[in-house]
Image (spheres, grey):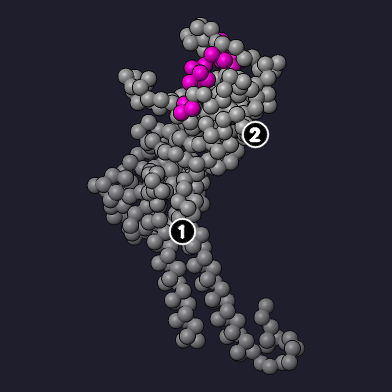
Amino acid sequence: MATFLITLHFLIFTLCTLVKSQSNLCRTSCGDTQINYPFGIDDGCGSPYYRNILVCSESNHLELRTPSGKYPVRRIDYSDPHILVTDPSMWNCQDATHFRPPRPFSLDTSIHFSLSPQNDYLFFNCSEKDVIVEPKPVVCERFPDRCDSTCDSASYLCRHLPECTHAVGASTSCCSYYPKATESLRLMLKYCETYTSVYWRNLGESQTYNIPPEYGIRIDFDIPVTTRCLQCQDGSKGGGTCGFDVGTHDFSCLCDHGNVTTYCKDHSQHGKSNRVVAGTATAVSVAGAIGIGAGVWYFRKVKAQAPVTHGVQSNENRLF
């Protein structure tokens, strides 16, 4: 009996220590990429709007998860909020004229993401029977909505492919088109051999044309800022980390001593029983361990006290 109680006490202490330490497990980087609010790569960290969107692989590479797959993240910019990702299935300079079947890129519309208008999409070898491929007139620059259905064959990027101007040769046709919906992109790829995305870096008006475009997909995101999150992050109030309860999605401020619903130095909450954010599943495991241990102890006690009846159940040895 004494040995059992010591073992149970040790198990509870170990698991409770693990639960408390979970509140400090919001990693702030994956490889060379900083992970700041509103994102998180550990459940319960950041904003619930972006839960399970970013994945840090075992090899320490950051990926963005979308309905069309996982995509390597090249960088995250928080001052000009956007993520730059690459799609390995898209055409690149090394492919030259060897076109691979691509998969249409898509985003979950329920998340605070949007494809940036700074993206340009280049389509190669499109069927001119099914796609309007022609140079866009000058009026399109002033009234772009009037030319939505045209794939521009006179695109600057088609004539000056970034990093490899002469990669495709004269026998390959190229045109530029911005699909406003995933279905539009699927239709384009039905009649074109492949495509790629080019992103123009925004470094200010005076520098726009001094920086060459690069391959990638820019995704703009919103940063949901609340008063509670600002108070939580305030260094004078404890400098906590904004997170959320994985069960209810309610706001939680992650602190060294545990999790609170206001800010780390709010002494009125220190005596309260706060729900663990990242450690909710572990907390359940603690309760389960206690319940199983108690059940085993009770069963042994009953078994020891029950009269020997050689398998015959009577009122004296009945458990229920």
x and y, in percent, of residue 308 in the image: 68, 93
Q: Which quadrant holds residue 275?
A: bottom left
Q: Which residues are magenta?
A: 146-164
Query: What residue did someone put label 1 on?
Result: 279
The disc labelled 1 sits on which kind of residue? Gly
Does 186 appear in magenta?
no
**Residue located farthest toward the right when viewing the structure as drawn:** 312
Is residue 165 depicted above or below 134 in this figure?
below
- Residue 181: tell me if it is visible: no
For residue 7, above or below residue 211: below
Q: Which residue does the image show at 42% across and 72% down from the upper left? A: 13
Residue 27 can be seen in this image: yes
- Residue at 48%, 21% (x, y): give it: 160
- In this rendering, which labeled residue sits more in front, label 1 or label 2? 2
- For badge 2, the amino acid type reads Pro
- Against 240, residue 291 (above or below) is below
Residue 210 shown left or right of residue 196 in the figure? left
User: Quarter-wise, where is residue 173 in the image?
Assistant: top right
Give the residue at x 45% y 55%. Answer: 278
Q: Earlier in the sequence, mark 1 or mark 2?
A: 2
Q: Which structural element holds mark 2?
A: loop
- 156 shown above or below 213: above
Image quarter (top left, top right, bottom left or bottom right) of the C terminus: bottom right
Mark 1 closeness class: few <14, some 14–19, many ≥20 residues within 10 Å: many
Q: Between 181 and 103, which is closer to the camera in this rendering?
A: 103
Q: Position of residue 42 (x, y in %)?
A: 45, 51
Give the camera-side residue of 43 and 96: 96
> x%, y% of residue 280?
48, 58
Residue 161 covered by magenta stretch? yes
Residue 49, horizontal then vertical, whole percent: 48, 40
Q: Look at mark 2 in the image and give the residue it sits on.
A: 101
Label 2 crowd (10 A; few <14 / some 14-19 / many >=20) = few
